[in-house]
Amino acid sequence: MGYQYGNWNKKYICSLDSITDRKLRSYIKKGELGNFIWNNVRMTYKISMNIQQIPELQQYTLDYGFEQLKNINFLLYEYQKRVTIKLLT
């Protein structure tokens, strides 16, 4: 998906409400979808770990993060399946 550990770049950080389909397609075409996903995951994790005054909110954000990780793993599985099919045909 185009991400390497330690590849931190703030240009990929954005609110998920403001990302457009066009921008996502651009990331996919350039092989940068992984960079977009993992840079946003990392930023969200950093923010949620700093919410110590409200334990319920911190727990909610961590639960949300793990739910998103489940979604990312599904996307990765589908991505790898498509790449494998493309190689075999």
Image (spheres, rainbow, N blue to C red):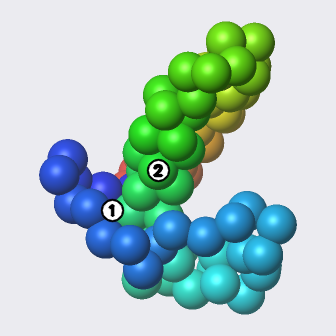
Image coordinates for residue 81, horizontal then vertical, percent:
52, 41
Q: Residue at x 52, y 42 (%)?
A: 47
Residue at the disc numbered 2: 43
Give the SS element for disc 1.
Answer: loop
Residue 89 horizontal side relative to residue 64, left or right: left
Quadrant where the image shows the N terminus: bottom left
Image coordinates for residue 60, horizontal then vertical, percent:
74, 19
Residue lying farthest right? 17
Asked whether 82 or 36 is in front, the reply is 36
4 shown above or below 78: below
Which amino acid is tagged 1? Answer: Gly
Residue at the disc numbered 1: 2
Q: Residue at x 22, y 60 (%)?
A: 7
- Which badge, 2 or 1, is on the more N-terminal residue? 1
Give the SS element for disc 2.
Answer: helix
Q: Quadrant of residue 3?
A: bottom left
Residue lying farthest front? 53
12 shown above or below 60: below
> Looking at the image, can residue 41 be seen?
no
- Do residues under tags 2 and 1 come within 8 Å of each other at their CB atoms? no
- Count neighbours of disc 2 (C-alpha within 10 A) and say few if under 14, some if 14 to 19, many if 20 or more: some
Residue 63 horizontal side relative to residue 29, left or right: right
Which amino acid is tagged 2? Answer: Met
Q: Quadrant of residue 56?
A: top right
Q: Residue at x 42, y 56 (%)?
A: 39
Asked whether 5 or 81 is in front, the reply is 5
Image coordinates for residue 43, horizontal then vertical, percent:
47, 50
Q: Residue at x 56, y 21 (%)?
A: 52
45 shown above or below 84: above
